Image (tube, rainbow, N blue to C red):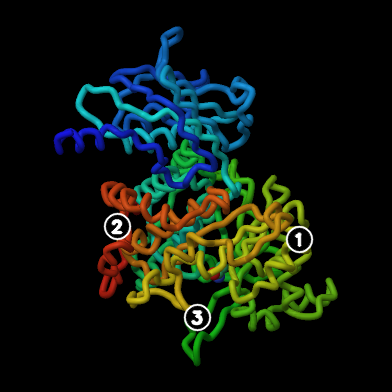
Amino acid sequence: MKPHHLILAALCTLSLRAQVIPLPADDRPRQGEFQLLPDAWMAIPAANPENLPDYVGLINAAGAKVRFAPQDVACAIQLLSANILPDNYPIPSGEGYVIRITPQVINIHAATAVGHYYGVQTLARLIEDAPKQPNQPIRLACRDIVDAPRFAWRGYMLDESRHFSGPAAVKRLLDAMARYKLNRLHWHLTDSPAWRIEIKKYPELTRTGGRGSETDRRPDAPAAFYTQEQIRGIVAYARQRGITIIPEIDMPGHADAAVAAYPEHDGGGFLAKGSTDKWPRFTFNPAKPATLSFLDDILTEVAALFPDAGVIHFGGDEVHFGWKKWTELPEVRDLMKRENLKDLAAVEAWFNRRMAGTINRLGFKTGGWDEIAARGLPKDKTVIWWWRHDKPQVLRDSLKAGYPVILCPRRPCYLDFVQHESHQAGRRWGGFNPLRDTYDFPAPLDLSAADEKQILGIQACLWTETTITRQRRDFMTWPRLVALAEAAWTPAAKKDFTSFETRLKPELAWLKAHGISAYDPFANSPEITDKGAKTEYLDTPE
Ligand code: ACM
C-alpha cells in the first residue's frame, strides 16, 4: 500500500472501543457496521412529546441528521420496550438499557423513558466519535451495549447561598450532568450568607435575606434569588434530562439570612475565632411555636415546588457551633422542662424530629447531613448524607442503624478542595482532592456487598465560599464531576483510570465548547483563583 492508502485505511477503521463516559457496564463488538444515512427516521415510543426528553435533538447535536418518524416507515434508530429482546439478553429495568447496533438497524431497549434517554446519550457519544463527511452516511461498528448504573444516586450539590449561580448557569450545569448520566442535583438554597428561594408567604426572605454574598456584605447589596416560576422551569428542565432536584433548606443552623429578614425567629449565633461576631444569628429559635410554624409554611411551599424530589433536605449540620444562646431563650427552657430534655443536643434532636414530622407529612423523606444520624429519626423516612470524612464511625453507625446513606465525604467529594498540589485557592485537609481520588472513590471505604445495598450512591459537593465567579465554580467542578460520574455509574471491576484519562481528553474540548471553564489536568492549565474578583449578580430577577 502507498502511504496515503495506509492513512485512509486507518481512518476507515471503525472505533470498536466505546469513547463513552461513564464507561458502559458491558460493550461487545460484533461483525459489520451500520450506516446511518442523512435524514434517517428515528422511532420513539408514543407518549406526550412535551414530557419526553428530546431524543432526536440529542442525536442531531452529536452530528447526525435524523428525523422523528411518522407511523409505518422503516426506521434507522428505534426506541423499543425492554421485553422484546432476543432470549439471550438481560431485560433492562429502571435506568438500564440495551443498545443493539446491527447492519440493519439500531435498537435501544429500555423499560422507562430515562432508560431510553441514557441509551440515546450513549448512542450520541458513538455518533460524535465517528468520522463524518457532508451528506455521507455515518458508519457505526456493530455492537451490543448492555448497561445499567452501579448506584441509583449520582449527585452534585451546588451551594447557591455563598455565591449565586442563576438560571442560565444551572441549565448549562444540568445539560452537562445529563451527558454524564448524573441524576441528582442537591440544591443548597439557603445558608447564612443569603436565602435564594422565593417564599410567597414571607417575601422578606428574599428581599432582605437574598442580599449580598459571602464576599459582599453591604446591607444595600442587590438581592439574587430564584423566583418560584424560575424554579418550576428549572425542575421541568432537569426532569427532561433524567435529573431530580432535591432542595435543601438548612435548619436550625446556618440561618442568619432568614433571621435577618424575620428577627423574631432568632436563636442566637456564635463568636467565630476570637471575638469576631461573624454569624450572630446562626440559628432559628428551635422551640418557639411561631418559628416552628414559620418553618412549616416554608417547607409547605418548597414541597409544592419540588413535587418529584422524594426527599427534602433540612440540613441539620454544625448546629452546636451556634447554639450557646439557646440556654437563655425562655421557649427553650420551657421545652426542656416540659419534655424533660437534659441538654442542648436533646433540644436539637427534638427540633429535628419535629421538623422531620412536617416533611414526612408533606409526603417526602427527610434528608440531612450526618449529624442527624443519631437523632432517632425513622429509618424508612430518612436519608443520611455522610460528609465528615474524619468521622468514619458516623458512617458505620448510620449503616448499622439501617439508614440509607449518600456518600459525600469532604475527601474526596468536596470540590471546594484544591485539585492540584500547585493550586493556591481552596481548601486542604491533610491533603487535597485530585481527579484520581475522586475517580477511585468509593474503593478506599472497602464497602461490603451489604453496605453497598444500603448506600444510595455518591455525590460531589461544591461549597462556594471561594468561588465568586462562574468561571471559578466551573474550574473547581470540572472535570472532577466527570470522574465522579464514572465512579457512580461504572461497575467497580470495570473502572480503569488510564482508560478514563484517554476518554476525558475529548470531553475537555466539549466542556470548553459549552462555555464551561474546566481545569485541564493534562496541560495543568492556569488556576482560576478569583483573586480580586467581585460578586456577580448574574441572572437576577429585576
Ligand atoms: C457541611 O459541609 N457543613 C455539610
Amino acid type at image mark 1: Leu
Identify the image quadrant of the N terminus. Answer: top left
Question: Which residue is painted at 76% across and 52% down in the image?
Answer: 380
Identify the secondary structure beneath mark 2.
Answer: loop
**Looking at this view, is 440 or 380 the one in front?**
440
Question: Which residue is painted at 74% across and 73% down in the image?
Answer: 347
The label number, if any, that marks residue 194 in the structure image:
none
Residue on which the image places disc 2: 517
Residue on which the image places disc 1: 377
Amino acid type at image mark 3: Gly
Residue on which the image places disc 3: 430
Of callouts 2 and 1, which one flags the residue occurring earlier in the amino acid sequence?
1
**Looking at this view, is 459 or 238 the one in front?**
459
Of callouts 2 and 3, which one flags the residue occurring earlier in the amino acid sequence?
3
Q: Is mark 3 in CB contact (under 8 Å) with mark 1?
A: no
For label 1, the crowd category at 10 Å Cα-Cα, with few meaning under 14, some 14 to 19 and many 20 or more, is: many
Of callouts 3 and 1, which one flags the residue occurring earlier in the amino acid sequence?
1
* Front label number (2 vs 1): 2
Q: CA distance from mark 2 to mark 1?
A: 41 Å
Identify the secondary structure beneath mark 3.
Answer: loop
Left-right relation of 17 to 382: left
